[in-house]
Structure formats: structure tokens, C-alpha cells
């Protein structure tokens, strides 16, 4: 992947123009409790441009008049600390393994930045993500300003680095799609395992354990986000993560779980009956969500606006809800009033990539972005009938359903990366009964 990372840096450098510097720190380590840290995960933008996974690292791209330099600051090698906490690449390793033109001990950052920023016109940096680092740069700018009578010019522009990188990340390369396909394959397998293991009387956390087991067994170091394992009415809580209730015979189980692989996310939701057979009401609502999802996926095509697939899902759901008697009134008026929002209160998807809700704009000016090959998004309509919903008959209440797939826009249409996770109700029932 080295060339992939260097290609990205070249593209960024091109956009920066001459006499400029880009400064990008990775994520900071976070305390979980006392002296225990959360597992470290590099900042997505930083990893996208470097492939470097250690904490306490900063990327600098310097574009002078005729040449440019890729510089990595990282932790110095340290025999004693490496015995306790694991190996480090050190600046030497940053050069040999990560193609850095130069690399330095992270402790030298302040001094080196001061040196390089003299005479630079444009500074590319993402303000507001790391307050300590923001202060360091503010200090640098102040120092330069105070030296103006000595002939030192301060930079004339500070420009958002995130803005450029996030536009780049919006369209995935072939190598990125491969990683995302792998992340989706792992998660699809985990959803199948969950269907096969599920039995009435189990606890949600037992199913959660199956998912995590399957993720990690296949090389995923972590879920891409906390898994949602929501039995019965818990599915009506959109971000339910308690995952500690008993699974009841006759209820549905909604699982929203995606593996992260090499810092790329999958994001898949499947909903199935705890006992392996849909009830009549569950099946009616499930069929409706599935038909909305299939219609929406058809609208994931190059040239169509980002909003087209959401609008389609809303139309199919509204029509279906009228047919089932859950919404009453004129179709056009109900659409206009957003009546579906009582049962469908989120949008039909989002960009997907290194971050589960991935970066990149959704609109350009007033217009929704047009889909282009290489963009990846989720298609995830759902219906959630609140347990205390008074406007519908009792038999519908407490049912929550979502079906979510990961879809890449191709030159001719789209490809569903998560197609291996069964979603047709007959297939789901067959898999569960065969288990
Ligand atoms: N898992 C979060 C989402 O579906 O957007
Ligand atoms: Mn999801
Ligand atoms: Mn999602």
C-alpha cells in the first residue's frame, strides 16, 4: 500500500500549491480509567495519508518552490519502553517503512515547525480537532509575527486541511474498495452466525459475543462502532447499545453491527425473528422495509443526486404504511407533511469509509451531490412502531425493523458489498431453521 499512500500525498501536494505546509497530527491517546488507555486508533485523515499507526505522530508536507518533502515526527525508539509497551518504528523506521523523506523525534516538532514556517505563505491545518495542537500552532504564528521587524513574514493564509482531504476520501480507490469489501464480508459472516446462534431465552450480550468473536477471528481488531443488539421493543431505540436484555420468543432481533478492517468500516443491519419464524405483522412490516430498501438501492447510480434514494425509500414506506392502515389520509399530503417520520425518523443512509459516518460533503451549494463511481454509502430504511404508539392497533406496537447494506457506486450502477448477509425473509427463516 506504500504507493497508494504516496499517491494520496502527491494529490494533496498538488492542491496545496508552492510555498505551503500541511500539518496533520494523529489522534491522541485517551484514558479509559486510571492508567488504562482505550485501544489506540489513528486519526483517519492521518492514516489515509501515511499508513502509520503509532500514537504521538505528526505528518508534515512541505512544498517549497521546486520540490516537496514528506516528513514524519514520531516517538524515538526506547529499549526500556519497548520492553513494556511494544515495538516502535522510530524515525529511522518511518523512513525505511513509510517512505518518509525525513523523520524526527516528536520532541523536535516545535523547533522544526518554527524553522519551516518562516517564509511560508499558506498553512494547511484542521483547526478545532486537537486543542493542544491548535495552541501550538497559534504560538508559532505569534512568534513569527513578533519577528516581523527582523524581516520574517508570517503566513498569509491558514486553510482547512480537512476540507481537501475529505473531498479526496469521498471517492474510494480500488484498493480501498477491496478493504471495504473485506470488512463487509467479515460482518456479513457475523450476521449469519448471529442468526444461527439465536434462541429464545438467550441474552442480547450472548449474540453480541458471537459478533465480536467472528469479527476478531477474521482479523478485525474492533467493531467499527458499538454493536446494536436490540431484541423486541429495544429496536425502537435507534442507538440502543445496552445489549443486556433477554431475547423473547415471538420478538424480532435487530442487529446493527459492522467490522472495522485495516481502519475501514462496514455498517450492516439485519432484523430477524428470535424463534426463526416471522409473525404476520412482523412479516408485513419486514416486507415493506425490504421493498423500500430494494427500490432505494436501484437509485444508487452515477449521475443521480445523493437524495434520490432517500426520497424513494420515503415514498415506498409511505405507500406501504397507508396500505397496512398505519397511516391514514391522502398519499401526497402525507408525504408533504412528513407523516412517515413518526415511524421512520432517520435518513436512508450516509457516506461510509474509514469512519462509519464518513467524511465528505453531501451538498454542493444548494444541490445534493451527484453520485460518482467510487463513492460508498449505506442504504438503511427502517420502521419503528413505538411501544406506546396510540395511533396504531396494538398488534403493531413495539416492532422495530431496519435493513442496512453497504453500497458502492460503480460506472454502470452499484455493487452491494454486504450482499452475503441474507435479507430475504424466506432465506433468513431457512438459515435459522437449518441451524
Ligand atoms: N450504525 C450507525 C448507522 O447505521 O448509521
Ligand atoms: Mn448501522
Ligand atoms: Mn449506517
Image: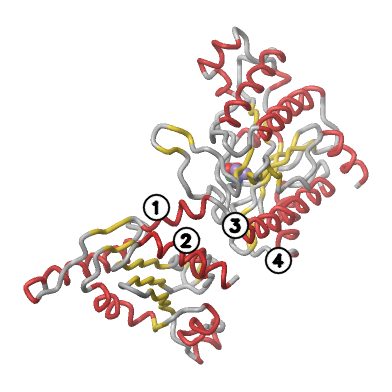
Up-down relation of residue 98 to residue 240 (above or below): below
Reading the image, the residue beneath label 4 is: 219
Of the numbered discs 1 and 3, the one sitting upstream in the chain is 1
**Mark 2 Cα within 10 Å, few/some/many (few <14, many 20+)?**
many
Q: Distance between the residues labelled 3 and 4?
A: 22 Å
Up-down relation of residue 4 to residue 108 (above or below): above
Reading the image, the residue beneath label 3 is: 173
**Mark 4 Cα within 10 Å, few/some/many (few <14, many 20+)?**
some
**Of helix, strand and loop, which one carries label 4?**
loop
Task: State ligand 1's quadrant.
Answer: top right
Residue at point 52%, 83% (across, down): 89
Of the numbered discs 3 and 2, the one sitting upstream in the chain is 2
Q: Distance between the residues labelled 1 and 3?
A: 19 Å
Which mark is in front, 4 or 1? 1
Give the x, y percent position of residue 22: 35, 66
Give the x, y percent position of residue 74: 43, 79
Q: How far apart are marks 2 and 1 (CA)?
A: 11 Å
**Of helix, strand and loop, which one carries label 3?**
loop
Say left or right for 417 vs 91.
right
Reading the image, the residue beneath label 2 is: 45
Residue at point 57%, 43% (across, down): 372
Of the numbered discs 2 and 4, the one sitting upstream in the chain is 2
Q: Nearer the viewer, residue 358 or 251?
A: 358
Residue farthest to the bottom, as pictured: 79
Which mark is in front, 3 or 4? 3
**Of helix, strand and loop, which one carries label 2?**
helix
Q: Distance between the residues labelled 2 and 4?
A: 22 Å
Amino acid at each position: 500500500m506504500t504507493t497508494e499512500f504516496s499517491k494520496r500525498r502527491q494529490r494533496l501536494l498538488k492542491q496545496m500549491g508552492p510555498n505551503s505546509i500541511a500539518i496533520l497530527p494523529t489522534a491522541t491517546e485517551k484514558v479509559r480509567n486510571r492508567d488504562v488507555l482505550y485501544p489506540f486508533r489513528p486519526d483517519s485523515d492521518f492514516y489515509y495519508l501515511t499508513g502509520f499507526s503509532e500514537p504521538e505522530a505528526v505528518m508534515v508536507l512541505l512544498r517549497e518552490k521546486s520540490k516537496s518533502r514528506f516528513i514524519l515526527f514520531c516517538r524515538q525508539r526506547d529499549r526500556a519502553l519497548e520492553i513494556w509497551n511494544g515495538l516502535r518504528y522510530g524515525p529511522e523506521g518511518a523512513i525505511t517503512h513509510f517512505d518518509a523523506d525525513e523523520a524526527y523525534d516528536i520532541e523536535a516538532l516545535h523547533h522544526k515547525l518554527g524553522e519551516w514556517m518562516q517564509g511560508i505563505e499558506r498553512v494547511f491545518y484542521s483547526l478545532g480537532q486537537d486543542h493542544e495542537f491548535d495552541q501550538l500552532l497559534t504560538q508559532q504564528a505569534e512568534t513569527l509575527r513578533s519577528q516581523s521587524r527582523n524581516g520574517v513574514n508570517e503566513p498569509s493564509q491558514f486553510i482547512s486541511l480537512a476540507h481537501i482531504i475529505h473531498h479526496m476520501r469521498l471517492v474510494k480507490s480500488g484498493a480501498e474498495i477491496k478493504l471495504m469489501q473485506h470488512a463487509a464480508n467479515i460482518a456479513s459472516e457475523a450476521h449469519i452466525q448471529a442468526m444461527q446462534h439465536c434462541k429464545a431465552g438467550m441474552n442480547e450480550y450472548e449474540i453480541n459475543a458471537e459478533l465480536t468473536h467472528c469479527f476478531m477471528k477474521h482479523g478485525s481488531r474492533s467493531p467499527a462502532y458499538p454493536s446494536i443488539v436490540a431484541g423486541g421493543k429495544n429496536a425502537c431505540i435507534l442507538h440502543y447499545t445496552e445489549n443486556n436484555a433477554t431475547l423473547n420468543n415471538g420478538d424480532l432481533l435487530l442487529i446493527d453491527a459492522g467490522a472495522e478492517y485495516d481502519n475501514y468500516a462496514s455498517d450492516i443491519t439485519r432484523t430477524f425473528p428470535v424463534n426463526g419464524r416471522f409473525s404476520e405483522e412482523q412479516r408485513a412490516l419486514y416486507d415493506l422495509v425490504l421493498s423500500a430498501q430494494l427500490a432505494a438501492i436501484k437509485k444508487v447510480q452515477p449521475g443521480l443526486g445523493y437524495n434520490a434514494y432517500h426520497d424513494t425509500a420515503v415514498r415506498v414506506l409511505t405507500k406501504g404504511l397507508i396500505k397496512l392502515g398505519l397511516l391514514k389520509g391522502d398519499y401526497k399530503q402525507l408525504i408533504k407533511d412528513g407523516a412517515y417520520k413518526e415511524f421512520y425518523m432517520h435518513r436512508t443512509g450516509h457516506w461510509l469509509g474509514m469512519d462509519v459516518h464518513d467524511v465528505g460533503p453531501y451538498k454542493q451549494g444548494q444541490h445534493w451531490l451527484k453520485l460518482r463511481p467510487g463513492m460508498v454509502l449505506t442504504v438503511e430504511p427502517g420502521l419503528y412502531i413505538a411501544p406506546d404508539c396510540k395511533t396504531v392497533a396494538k398488534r403493531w406496537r413495539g416492532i422495530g425493523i431496519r435493513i442496512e447494506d453497504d453500497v458502492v457506486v460503480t460506472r454502470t450502477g452499484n455493487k452491494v458489498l454486504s450482499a452475503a448477509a441474507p435479507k430475504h425473509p424466506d432465506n433468513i427463516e431457512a438459515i435459522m431453521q437449518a441451524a
